[in-house]
Every structure is written in structure tokens, then in C-alpha cells.
Image (cartoon, coloured by chain):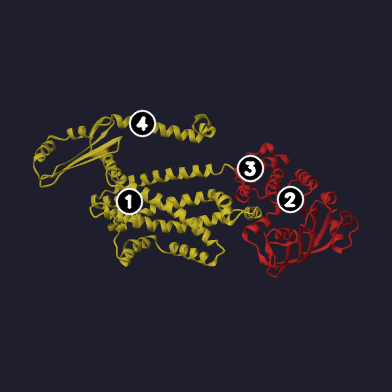
Chain colours: A yellow, B red
Amino acid sequence: MSKLKKLVTFKHWQRSTKTAVILIVAALVLVFVLSAINVSEQDMLNNASPAIKQIIEEEKTSSRKSLTITYNNLGVMNYISFTTSGASAIKESYVGFAGAIYGADEGGWKFAGQMVNYTYRMLGTGENLLHGVKLTLLLTTLSMGIGAIMSVFLALGKISENKLISKISSAYIFFFRGTPLLIQMFVIYFSVPGIFGFSWRSLFSAGDPEAVYKGAFIAALIAFSLNAAAYCAEIVRAAIQSIDKGQNEAAKALGMSYGQMMRTIIIPQSIRRMIPPLCNEFVMMIKDVSLVFAISLMDITTISKTIMTSEGNYLVFIPALLIYLVITAIFTLLFGKIEKRLSIYE
Amino acid sequence: MSDYQYILSTEHLYKSFGSLEVLKDVNLSVKKGEVICIIGPSGAGKSTYLRSLNQLEKITSGKIFIKDELFLHREHNRTIHRAEPEAQKAMLLEMGMVFQRFNLFPHKTVLENVMIAQVLVRKKTPEAAKKLAEEIIERVGLSDKLDVYPSKLSGGQQQRVAIARALAMEPEIMLFDEPTSALDPELVGEVLGVMKQLAKQGMTMLCVTHEMGFAREVADRVVFMADGMILEEGAPKDIFDHPTNEKAISFLRSVL
């Protein structure tokens, strides 16, 4: 109870934590204020030119649509664009920021509007769960989680005195580290269903419009988990073997079984040593997820490349890089905290 | 009185690492309550002997007896069988071990270090384990350090916790493997103090040590080992004052 009290009492925190918390709170307040005073979608629609408004009115009753309206809301800033197709195409766009609306057809506001639009698309906002940042986060955390659990067994298998178990574990690690992740994913996505006569999408109901994506996601999750397990296994093995042999002997002399020793003495001590390389592996995985482009899933990298190809805007990579940096920063911070928390006894 | 002659004895113990013979025909018998100090030059096989007693090293050949029964075995219908795992563990737990480098569990507090094996191995309730642990920690004089992690303790204090941890398993024999060799000179006394107190309480002890003063004062018998063999054994007075073996003479001359 006193621990909890200490945790929530501001003056007990370390200076860096205080600074970080103050900055984050300040940023949240700023975001909240900016979002609160920002213009609504209706305001943006009302701001359109008379020509556009006329088309909107006309198309309300007709079945023919020539006007495309794109609305992207990032909270602090939103963006709307109207595009008509046909001979006399009209294109106009606006950015809403801090309670005012600005024309975004040229200059700085055009740039800002594009950034909002691209960021919105890469975040996967408004799209299904398996899109953009959501896909990246979901695939990375799930496959690292599954991989980490598998890796403990692989590592224990590899250092096992049982020759057969050791050989099997070693072979697994050798195979998954020795072949490209992309091909492993291809094998699971294309070859496995081919051999066993099923399709990944058929795992989901035929009526589900996202069945294709969900199926591809499951295949990717399996491939990434199997691959992560191999890499993590070496991290876990190295950490376990770095624990002083004396710990082993002390546990044996006290009559502990192998399982008791591993569970209560060796693995708890080795976890702290696993954190830095596991963080490394995690951060690599965030970027490796871009390989899913090959099985029709859209992550941050794939979306930015698609935008680049279809719209020819080379500035699209700026928000992509920033998004990656933010994700990596958050996880690095998190792993650092965990490492510190586990170091109390040293 | 006990229904056995020797609490611990070894017959023709051999141990080799590859082609290197570390123990060559080591025979020793220990009575209950005896304190035996094993001395000798480094590389003599003293630590290996101690470690092979509680299975940290597998012996190449020879026999170990605990209370006159073959270690890890049991007699049934006049034939000797390998004992069941539980029985083997019980025999192993007749011996407690204290290491040169303490080998405390760094992620556990002093109390947890002394409790953990009681709960896991002796299957005691945490309450019972805690009660005994506190009692033993008090005996080694560290009652004020119960919730401290080992890294915050001095070497001498760590070694006393290690002794407490071994005692908590209630062994009948304590094996000390150079318990003071890793300590700063001013910390040696507190550990030897605890060991003397144990000897006085009648604990059977085997100590590999370089503390000749301790051996002379506390030991019932001193064993001199060199080259993997016991070359001389006897009362401390005889060994220290009138050694007969050539090697013992030169070793004692260099350390005394």
C-alpha cells in the first residue's frame, strides 16, 4: 500500500520522470485546447466555394456522383478537399486549425494539409483495424509476445542435456535465422494452404468483407511469431548462460529441482539482462512489419509508398518517418522503465 | 545414541577431469558432531572433494556413505538399488553447503534467501518457513537486515546469510568450501565466529580452510591433502606441531 502511495506521490518521482510527465501533460493540455477550439466538419463543408456547394446540392438528389469529398480529422488540425471529375474539374482544399479555416491549395497550408492527409491515412484512422499504425502495433506486439514465450522453451531446449531436444531446438533456430522472413511469410501464406488444401480467408465467415485481410494477418502473425521466437531464443539463451554458475550450484545444494531452479532463480535474474537486446529486437520488428506489403496488408511503409506512387508526392515520407520515430521512442522508454524496475536489487 | 557408526564416510573416492586425476583414493570417516578441517596447497583437490560429496561433481569411482548407507541408494532384499528421487533428495539434504563466493540469490532479500528452499524443497508453509528463517538469521546476528538485498551487505554479512540459508534446511552435516577466502581480512572474524558457535552446538562440519588458527582451535581433526590424496590426518596439535609427511612439513612452514 505504501508502495502505491509512493508511486502516485509527485515529490517522490525522479527528476527525469517529473520533466517527462510535465511535458506530456502540457502537450495533452495543448492538444485538448486546440481540439476544443478547432472547427467542425460542418464548418469545413460550409466553407466550400459556391460552385462546390451547388454541386453538393445537385448531387443530393441524383444518383450520379462526380464530387469526391475527403475529410481528415487529426484533432488539432483537420483537412477537407473537394474534387470533381470530368472536363471542368474543380479542386479545392482547406485546412482547419485553431478555430480558423485556411485555403490549402498552395503554399504552407497546402503542405500542412497534405501532411494531415498523409498522417491520417498512415495512422489508419477510419480504416479497419488491420491498417497503418494499428497493423504495425498489433503485429509487432502480438508476434513479439508469442515469440518471447516460445523462445524461453527453445532456449531451455537448446541448453538441455537431452541431445534430441537440444538438436531440435538448435535446428529450429538455425532454420528461422538462416532464411529470409519474407520467404517464411510466403511459405505460410501461399504454400501451407496449398499443401493442406485450405485458404486463409476461409477461416473467417464468407460475408466478412475483411476476411482477406484477417486471413493475411493470421498468416503474417504466425510467420512473424515463429521468426521472432528464433531470434529471441538466442537472446534468452545468452542471458540464462550469463548467470553465474554459483547460482546453479547453490540451488542444487539446497535440493531444488531443475524446474524450480530455472523458475525461481535463473530466469528471474536473466530477464533483466534480456531487456536491452529484446528492445532492440522489438524495434527492428516494428520496421520488419513493412514486409506484409507482399501479402496485401497495408502498414505505414506500404501506405507511404502507395501514396508516393499514385500522387507523386515525395513529401509523404516525412510523416512516415516521424510516426516510426514516435512509436520507437515510446517503446524504448517503456523497455528502459522495465529494465530499471527489474534492477532494484543491484 | 545414534544407530550408525559414521555420519559420513568415503571409500576409495576417485575423480578425474579428462585425463587429470584430481582425487586419488580418498578415504575419510566422520563421526557425528566432529569438526574436520581440510587443509593443503591449492590444487590439492580439497574443494573438489567437498563438492563431490553433495553431487556438485560426479565422482569417477568410489563410494560415499551417509549414516552408513550408500549415498543415493537403498538396500532392498539384500541388493542395492538406486533410491527414489525423493529419497535421494532427502539424503542430499543431510548436507548443507557454504560456498567461497557466497552464491546468495541477488534478486531475493535476506529473508527470502533463507526461506525459498524451505518452501520449495521442504514444502513448508511460508509462515513456518519465515518463523525458522527469522530464528536462524537472528542466530547469525542479522535480524536488522531481513528485507535487505544481498548487494547491500558486506562480504562477511553475505557469508553469514549463506550459512543461515544452508542451516534453514536443517542439515546434519555442514560443508564449508573456503568460506572466508573471498573476504576482506577484517570480515573473516565474524564468519569464523558463527562457525565456532555452530561447532559448539555439536554440528558435524567439514571445512576446507586456510585459516590455520581456526583449524587449530576448533577442529577435532585436521586432514592434510595434496595431489588429490589425504597425506596426513590427526589431532590439530599433532598435525601443526609434529607433521611427519614431507609435503605437510613444507606446506605448514610456508603458511604458519
> What is the spatial separation of the Cα atoms under label 3 and label 2, in whole angstroms?
28 Å
Q: Which mark is residue B179?
A: 2
> What is the spatial separation of the Cα atoms under label 1 and label 3, in whole angstroms?
56 Å
> What is the spatial separation of the Cα atoms under label 1 and label 2, in whole angstroms?
60 Å
| Same chain, labels 2 and 4 | no
Q: Nearer the viewer, mark 3 or mark 2?
A: 3
Residue B196 image offset from top left, x and y in percent? 79, 46
Residue assigned mark 1? A299
Residue assigned mark 4? A30
Amino acid type, residue under disc 2 in the picture: Pro
Amino acid type, residue under disc 3 in the picture: Ala
Establish if B247 lies above or below A274.
below
Residue assigned mark 3? B128
Q: Is residue B163 left or right of residue A65?
A: right
| Same chain, labels 1 and 3 | no
> What is the spatial separation of the Cα atoms under label 1 and label 4, in whole angstroms?
29 Å
Amino acid type, residue under disc 1 in the picture: Asp
Q: Secondary structure at mark 3?
A: helix
Q: What is the chain letter for disc 2?
A: B
Count residues near mark 2 (Cα–Cα under 10 Å), then give few for <14, some for 14-19, many for 20+: many
Q: Looking at the image, which residue is at 63% across and 39% down?
A: B148
Q: What is the chain letter for disc 4?
A: A
Question: Along the line of sight, which residue is nearer the eye, B243 or B64?
Answer: B64
Q: Nearer the viewer, mark 1 or mark 4?
A: 1
| Same chain, labels 3 and 2 | yes
> What is the spatial separation of the Cα atoms under label 3 and label 4, in whole angstroms?
57 Å
Question: Along the line of sight, which residue is nearer the eye, B81 or A128?
Answer: B81
| Same chain, labels 1 and 4 | yes
